[in-house]
Amino acid sequence: LQKTCMLTLQKKSRRYSERARKSVESRIARLGYKNAKEEVENITHYLTNYAPLTVNVNAATTLQYLISDTHYRSMFEVSGYEEERDGWERRMFGGWYDADTDHFERPKYGSVNFC
C-alpha cells in the first residue's frame, strides 16, 4: 500500500512541480537574475539535501508518550481526526488511503524549517 501510494503521489507531484518550477523561474527572471533556471536548481538542491526537517511537538504534553511508545504516531492515531483526514487524503492520494486503512499505515506529516 505504501509503495503504491508513494508512486501515485510522485506522478501527481511531478506534474505540479513542473508547473510551479516554471512559474518560479519566471518570477526570478523578472527580478533580474541572469540564469533563473540555475537559481531554482540551487534552491531545490538546498531544500532537498540541507533544509532541516522539523517535527513540531509540545514537549509538556507529548514527551511522555514519545518516550514510552515504540513508534512515532500521528495526531490522527491518537486524537480522532479521522473524518477530516479521510477527505483530504482521498484528494491528495487518489483514494489509496481509504477509511479502512489502519492509521498507523498512513503517512506521518512534518514541516520544513526554512529559518
Image: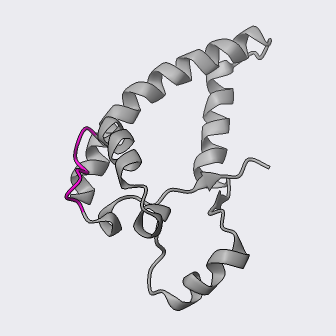
**Residue occupying the point 62% across, 18% down:** 25
33 w.r.t. 41: above or below: above
Query: How many numbered tags mark residues here?
Result: 0
Instruction: Report the front residue among 43 and 5.
Output: 5
Closer to the camera, 38 or 19?
A: 19
Find residue 101 and report its horizontal and vertical position in percent: 23, 60
Quadrant in the rendering for residue 59: bottom right
Left or right position of 109 against 113:
left
Q: Position of residue 60 (x, y in %)?
A: 72, 77
Q: Confirm whether the magenta stretch covers residue 95.
A: yes
Determine the residue positioned at 22% across, 51% down: 4
Q: Quadrant of residue 95?
A: top left
Query: Which residue is at a point 75% across and 15% down the rendered structure image?
Result: 34
Give percent across and percent down for residue 110: 56, 57
Screen quadrant of the N terminus? bottom left
Q: Is residue 72 above or below residue 3?
A: below
Q: Residue 45 at x, y = what percent?
A: 61, 43
Decide if residue 78 is on the left or right side of residue 100: right
> Would residue 115 be counted in the magenta stretch?
no
- Going 35% across and 49% down the picture, which residue do you hit? 83
Q: Which residues are magenta?
A: 94-101
Colouring style: one colour
Figure check: 11 above or below 66: above
State the residue in front, 51 or 35: 51
**Up-down relation of residue 94 to residue 106 (above or below):** above
Query: For the stretch drawn in magenta, what is the main secondary structure?
Result: loop
Give the residue at the far top of this rendering: 30
